[in-house]
Image (cartoon, helix red, strand yellow):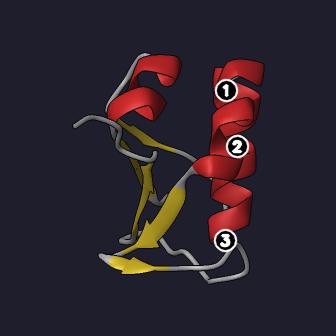
Amino acid sequence: MPVLRLFAAARERAGTARDTLPGSTVGEVLASAVDRYGEGFAALLPSCRVWLNGEEAGFDAPAGEHDEVAVLPPVSGG
């Protein structure tokens, strides 16, 4: 299963920084994450950037057993 890495607010809403979730595409992995972490996590996703193995990826990008999907919320601060 692909590894899901979560940063900042995504990590806080999920309660973990790393997990393994089923899915053969980035979108399926994220759908599994929403099922596991709930509405608060789902509400954050539209504002996040999603990366697959260090490169920005769309929801239809294939994700395999040795891949890493990262969710990066926008950074705020001054």
Q: Nearer the viewer, mark 3 or mark 1?
A: 1
The type of residue carrying mark 2 is: Ser
Q: Which residue lies under the disc numbered 2?
A: 32
Identify which residue is drawn at 43% across, 28% down.
Answer: 9
Q: Is residue 18 left or right of residue 36?
A: left
> Residues under labels 3 and 1: Cα distance?
17 Å
Q: Position of residue 68 (x, y in %)?
A: 37, 64
- Find residue 39 and report its image quarter: top right
Q: Secondary structure at mark 3?
A: loop
**Which residue reaches farthest front?**
78
User: Mark 1 touching mark 2, by CB under 8 A?
Assistant: yes
Q: Position of residue 14 (x, y in %)?
A: 50, 23
Quick check: 59 above or below 7? below
Question: Closest to the observer: 3 or 53?
Answer: 53
Q: Which residue lies under the disc numbered 1?
A: 36
- Find residue 59 and report its image quarter: bottom right
Quick check: 40 above or below 62? above
The type of residue carrying mark 1 is: Arg
Identify which residue is drawn at 73% across, 80% down.
Answer: 60
Q: Which residue lies under the disc numbered 3?
A: 24
Q: Is residue 73 left or right of residue 44?
A: left
